[in-house]
Amino acid sequence: MAKLISSLILHSFASRGRIFYNFHSTLSSSIKTIATHIEALRKTSVSVEGTPKKHDRFDNVDDALALFNKMIQKYPKPSIVEFTKLLASIVRMKRYSPVVSMCSQMGLSGVSNNVYSLNILVNCFCQLGRIDFGLSVLGKMLKLDVEPDVVTFSTLINGLCKQSKISLAVSLFDEMVEKGYQPHLITYSIILNGLSKMGDTDRAVRFLRLMEEKGFKSDVVAYGTVIDCLCKNGLLKQALHLFSELKVKGNRPDTVIYNCLIHGGYDFGSIDTVRTMRKQGIEPDAITYNILIDAYCKEGMVCEAIDTVQTMRKQCIEPNVVTYNILIDACCKESMVCEAIDTVQTMRKQGIEPDVVTYNILVDAYCKEGMVSKAEDIVGMMRKQGIGPDVVTYTALIDGHCLQNKMEKARGVFLLMTKEGCAPNIRSYNVLINGYCKAKRLDEAIELFNEMSRTGPSPDNVTYNTLMQGMFQLGRVTAACKLLGKMLASGLVPSQVTCTILLDGLCKSGKLQVALKIFQAIRNSGLELNIVFYNILIDGLCKAGHIEEAKELFRKLSVEGLKPTIYTYNIMINGFCKEGLPDEAYQLCRSMREDDCLPDSISYNVMIQGYFRNSSTSKATQLLAEMVEKGFSADLCTATLSGTQLDRKDEASNVASPSDPENFPFVVLGNKVDVDGGNSRVVSEKKARAWCGSKGNIPYFETSAKEGVNVEEANQCVAKDALKEEIYLPDTIDPAANRGRADANVDMYHVIFPKWFSNLKCWE
């Protein structure tokens, strides 16, 4: 036993953990068990005056401490039983530190401890988060020849579980059984709860079975603990099996178990579940309805969520701040910020004041909508209500400024939160680092990363991924690879995102052979490779002119059990066309149906351009007609390359098929001029303007929706012409269809025929 104790004490100093909370846990604590032992001594105990006296209940700790001081000064000293009763009464007040001090005084005064008093001391150390001292008391018990009992071990096991040291708790449980101690139901329940909090579903189920094998009847709490664990880990089928088993054994499921199942997806989003509960005599509570409301909101079914709130009220269950926060969050995610504000007013009228979560939802929503000043107004409102901003509030503001590329203001908020005693968390650092990287201020991002490594939270995968991607985008390949080495040295395991950033960065930096070697190493490591990995490599091979190798990798997709996406096909189509093989591109396009894919606007435009560049005008014209028939539009590169086919404006109109081509307000936008400073553009501004001039001086604007360049001017131009002619504005030729195309340069320009010119600012 001494060997066991020394081993556990060593582990208790070495291990680190964090506490997880389970909202429905109703397990009895070891204090109650200790109190049971003390209660058994009540009848046989005597007071310091020698007559029976009940002093195990006090109104405050000061009375208990006053009595203790009298007892410790008595001669002869009262029995350990009297001291133990007093200690237990203070523990019931949840005042653990005074008990530790009193036990120390008892030892110095020569009061001999027994197993009950030492168990109380072990419990106090565990409640104070000092499981290491609790294990030391166990060692002291052995030294004093005081035999520990089941309560001793159960208390220590509970302490270990509270610190998420579940493996140590299970080891102590196993050794306890091995030494001949018989665990009671509370001990099993503590371990079961710990395993469930850790998400170890297999061991939790096995432990439930072990309880039953040892003759303990698993109750609703035990089953509910495991069912909740299964639901949270997406194992709904197994949870429903245990739910059925619980009912077969004569147990009546309670509201908590139904809440777990509803939250896990059972009878998702259906008020019928609530009716089922009522038929069985089980009344749903506010948590039940909040789970249903949250489920509706996550599916964008806000009206159904509001109806559920009305149902709550009809059942005399008043919505609480959580209910309203769910609704407010749903409105904000649907960009219905005004409706969210109205909901805040409604909850106030109901006598429910917003909490920090409510305000944080609004701050985040305004920041994401680009209205940081309004978000700051909300923070001011918080302070007036006596609610201080927390790390979530500050991080949302930092993100808002970063999205507006106002990095000085973002840094200012970061410094302010530190000054006000709110320590930035990992997300705060990651958001600011990402902002610096997006603003191409990489040195400041690296400086913040180094600061974080010295004094902040440890960088996580997101931190390394963000910084690595920023380095690759600015061509700092060596620095990115060194950062990856640092990440591996820190003990972090690269995720799929890490690997795709690495491969994409290497391919775009011309390090194709290195990328291929790393790709093979990743495959050999056993990491599951999805279609994104293959898309990156196929694209890299095509752009490097290795079309045969790209074809071979494309063919391997079916062997790997992967289906090519439309993006994969477009990469290959573009690769064939660049190599002067438009017929192969055409054949591949026709085979897309086999993989449940259909050609899109990008597929057609790239093939048409490929045929025009290879002087196959008739085939290009045929595809052009087919594209228009399918409802897709020509981009400016396709229109430019069509040359003689688009000599007249009316023939250009046929590509877009407007209802009134003679009076239609054509506008050409050279969009995304902010990308790469215009260095990667294929069509120059001079050439674009010349083309527009040759087509009857079509208005031309160099625009950026992201930066807001010339967007309003283009709006006004279209509006003026449209209103002047009083014409109907037909459907837009989809300019967004070029997103993610294999050749991003071709996406520099679009011929735009707007349906609602007011939406033109949203097109990117």
Image (cartoon, rainbow, N blue to C red):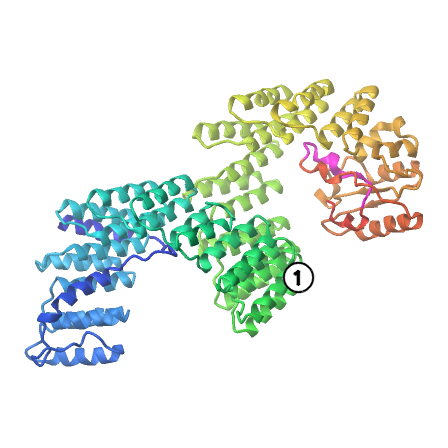
Residue 659, position as x, y percentages in the image: 88, 38
Quadrant of the image occupied by residue 13: bottom left
Q: Is residue 15 visible?
A: no
Residue 441, position as x, y percentages in the image: 62, 51
Q: Reply above or below: 589 against 81.
A: above
Q: Is residue 632 visible?
A: yes
Task: Name the element at disc 1.
Answer: helix
Quadrant of the image occupied by residue 108: bottom left
Q: Reply above or below: 200 against 29.
A: above
Per the rendered image, the range of residues in magenta is 741-755
Q: Residues within 10 Å of mark 1 (few under 14, many from 20)?
A: few
Q: Residue at x 74, y 45 (%)?
A: 763
Q: Reply above or below: 390 against 518.
A: below
Residue 394, position as x, y percentages in the image: 55, 62
Q: Amino acid at mark 1?
A: Cys
Total number of numbered discs in the rendering? 1
Residue 137, position as x, y percentages in the image: 18, 60
Residue under pointer 1: 338
User: Seen from this angle, which residue lies furthest front?
Assistant: 279
Question: Which residue is nearer to you in this view: 10 or 146?
Answer: 146
Question: Which residue is nearer to you in this view: 109 or 502?
Answer: 109
Reply yes or no: does residue 589 show up in magenta.
no
Horizontal relation, residue 634 to residue 309: left or right: right
